Amino acid sequence: RCTAHELASLGATVVLMGRREEKLQEVVAEIEADSKESGSQGKADYRVADIRDEERVIEAIADIVSQHGGIHALVNNAGGQFPSKVEDISKNGFQTVVENNLVGGFVMAREVYKATMKEHGGNVVNITADCNNGFPGMAHTGAARAGMENFTKTAAWEWGRYGVRVNAVAPGWIASSGMDNYPAHMKSWIRSLADAVPIKRMGTESEVSSAICFLLSPGAAFISGDCLRIDGAASQGGRVWPMPKAKNNEPYNGFHRAVTPKVLSDD
């Protein structure tokens, strides 16, 4: 949502895709209202689709190209998972997460490439997660995200000669609405996550969005096949070295519609 707003504010026509029409309509209305108020040229549209449905993805992308012309950028941002130990994950549960977090993103990228980017060039940014050292408690999404990072490298190599750049962004602990979807018993754990970050805070939606917009910009024209980790250095170091208190760690929050997750609020 934040990324869609930022791209639209920069003048892009943004097409949102998701399973719930009501949420898509809400964000489109926000973008249109903000564009009108600011006088920007940004526009928004949407398509209802489940990226795990290959036929629907192909149909939706063809429709977008027919209505809006070539697709210049794809942000593969769909994802979802649930907390569980490896031994308790069913085959169906593991497969469902992998299909959503890896296979669906692959289908989206492949079809956008075939429909328009192979001929005209373009940019793909795949959103993964900070799981460089494993993902205890969520092995299914860790496996999927690692696969997406490797896919990013391969697609960047194969598609580079057509002027297509492919990169990934791996957010760490980001204060966003998704945190409110986890069970109540995880509330104290979620609140403690900032303690595992060297700069002693969580990231903001704006800090992720800014990185995505940079990778899509001409300023990143020689960056491809890379994964940018936005995690406050949480993926570096180890438990042996002590983590002292932090200072000078004010977040960047440039999203005017950002809302603090309920789980992190003081109420």
Image (cartoon, grey):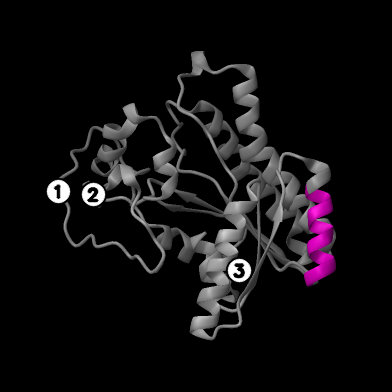
- Residue denoted by label 2: 200
**Where in the figure is residue 10, as x and y percent of width and height?**
55, 77
Residue extending furthest toward the top: 87
Residue 222 numbered tag: 3
**Where in the figure is residue 17, as x and y percent of width and height?**
67, 54
The residue shown at (56%, 39%) is 145
**Where in the figure is residue 112, as x and y percent of width and height?**
77, 57
Find numbered disc 2 in the image and state the secondary structure of the residue it sits on. loop
Asked if 181 appears above or below 96 in the picture, the reply is below
78 displayed left or right of 103: left
* Residue 167 visible within the image: no
Find numbered disc 1 in the image and state the secondary structure of the residue it sits on. loop
The foreground one among 261 and 89 is 261
The foreground one among 85 and 161 is 85
CA gap between label 1 and label 3 equals 37 Å
CA gap between label 1 and label 2 equals 7 Å
Q: Which residues are magenta?
A: 57-68
State which quadrant residue 237 falls in.
top left
32 displayed left or right of 116: left
Asked if marks 1 and 2 touch (Cβ < 8 Å), the reply is: yes
68 displayed left or right of 150: right
- Residue denoted by label 1: 245
State which quadrant residue 83 falls in.
top left
The foreground one among 141 and 241 is 141
Q: Nearer the viewer, mark 1 or mark 3?
A: 1
